[in-house]
Every structure is written in structure tokens, then in C-alpha cells.
Image (cartoon, rainbow, N blue to C red):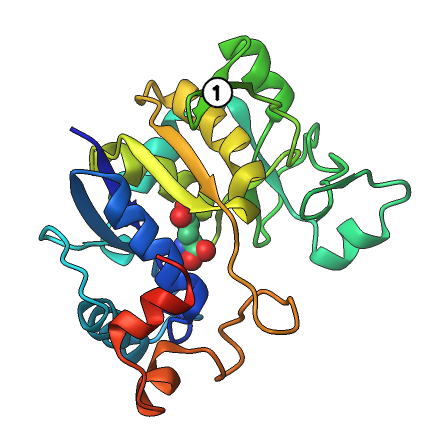
Amino acid sequence: MIVTRFAPSPTGYLHLGHAFAALTAAKSGDRFLLRIEDIDRARCRPEYEAAILEDLAWLGLRWEKPVLRQSKRAQVYREALERLAPFTYRCFCTRKDILSAAGAPHGDEGPLYPGTCRNLREERDAPCAIRLDAAKAAAHVGPLTFEERGRTVRVDPFRLGDVVIARKELPAAYHLAAVVDDACQGVTLVTRGEDLLASTHVQRLLQALLGLPAPAYAHHRLIVDAQGRKFSKREASGTLRSLREEGLTASEIRAKIAL
Ligand code: GLU
């Protein structure tokens, strides 16, 4: 029994790229689940969530109930964070501090965290983020792999550096919430865009630290527009709503993305 999921964040309307991701997830498994990644309340809007459900149904997708909403799961994330405490540290750096740190090495998503707060001793009463100490974590769990479309990939625990896994105002950041929820939902195959391949390395590490089962992965290509650019939620063009208003049918959308 293959269990897949689609996990959009309600920060905008779904576009063709999302349609491709959702349809790929649905056709790759026997059971298809939905998860609303609305943990960052400041960026999410209820009308986008309603639009997501409406657009997916219009596309002809059906998912199992209940829909998991990350905004309701703060307590579960806090417990996971506590269990990770031996492998985490508090970080007080601003984005600017990180960008200006001399010689910060670069990763898939910009500069890797240079480790400024890793060995901080003093207590400070200031907003902070919680980071995973990748070296400590890797030493604890030993070598890891994940399955990518039947191929075994060796995990690089340093691929994204010491990632943020929680912030003062957020009980969990994306990586932590995603692994806790994939396990809770019993997802056995994570299908998502290849832009998230680097994330899988750190997520596999978190799974091992938390003793969670490792799903298989299938990272798919990204759909691009006529200019070869990825679709973005910031642009109205290519949203499923605008295409629907132009008169396109769900089967025409499927044909457009060759599904
Ligand atoms: N919420 C993420 C996004 O919208 C997807 C995360 C995932 O599939 O793991 O990009």
C-alpha cells in the first residue's frame, strides 16, 4: 500500500506547478492525503486554503479525510523539538549577520549558516531560532541513505548546514514539521519537486534522530512557463483560477502539463 501526500502552503493561489505536483502525488500511490502547511500564520491566509481545496477538487482530485493542518499541531512539534534538544542550539543571528559573515560557504539555498552561535555560552533574553547541529547529529546517527525512485542515495548531512528547525514565534520550521507529519500521516512515498531534493538530506537526518520511519522519495521535474521560468505564487498568470476563468477545463490543464 503506497501512501502519498500533497502539502501546499496557503500563501497564494495554486498554479500549474502545484497542479502537476498534486496530480503526480495522487497517481503515484494507493492512498492520497492532503496536508496544509500553514504553520507560519503571518504568511498564510484562510481564503487561500479554501481556494486550494476548491481548485484541487475542480482538478478532479479526491483525498482522504481528515486534512492535516500544521497550525493545529504546535504541541506535537514542541515535543519533537524537546527530543532533539541534545542536537540543537539557540541562534541569535539576523539574516544580515549571516549574509555578512566572512567566508560563509554556499549551499543549495544560499549561504550556509557559518556556525556563529554554535558554541555560545552566555544566556540572552532575545528572540532566537533553534538550529540543528548537523555535525553532532550526523555523528550520533552514523551514515544514512534514502531511496529515490529505487536508487539508494547517500545522505549528506551538511548539504543545507545547520538548518533552523524552530523560531521563537514558530514551534517548528518546515523541515521539522514535515518529517513529524509525514510519519504521523503514515506517508510511505514522498513525491515533490526536485527543488526540494536538498531538503531530503536534512529531513532524513531528522527522521533518524527522532526514530521515525523513512519514506521513499520521488522528486519530480518542475513545470516551467513559456519563458522557461518556474511558476510563482506571486504572479497571477498560470494560477488555476485564472486559467479556469479563461475557460480551460480540468482535462485541458492535465493535457497542458502532460499528465
Ligand atoms: N509546503 C511545501 C511547498 O509548498 C511543500 C513541502 C513538501 O512537499 O515537503 O513548497
Q: Position of residue 159 (x, y in %)?
A: 65, 31
Residue closer to the observer: 76 or 203: 203
**Left or right relative to 19: residue 227:** right
Residue closer to the observer: 135 or 204: 204
Q: Position of residue 69 (x, y in %)?
A: 23, 56
Quick one: quadrant of the N terminus? Answer: top left
At a point 41% along the width and 19% down the height, the residue shown is: 208
**Left or right relative to 99: residue 56:** left
The outermost residue toward the right is 102
At a point 42% along the width and 46% down the height, the residue shown is: 192
The outermost residue toward the left is 65
Residue closer to the observer: 17 or 54: 17
Q: Position of residue 89 (x, y in %)?
A: 58, 32
Q: In which quadrant of the rendered view does residue 58 lie?
A: bottom left
Residue at numbered disc 1: 151
Q: In which quadrant of the rendered view does residue 133 lie?
A: top right
Q: Is residue 170 visible?
A: no
At a point 73% along the width and 34% down the height, the residue shown is: 115
SS class, disc 1 = strand
Q: Is residue 135 visible?
A: yes
Q: Amino acid at mark 1?
A: Arg
Q: In which quadrant of the rendered view does residue 88 lie?
A: top right
Quick one: quadrant of the C terminus? Answer: bottom left
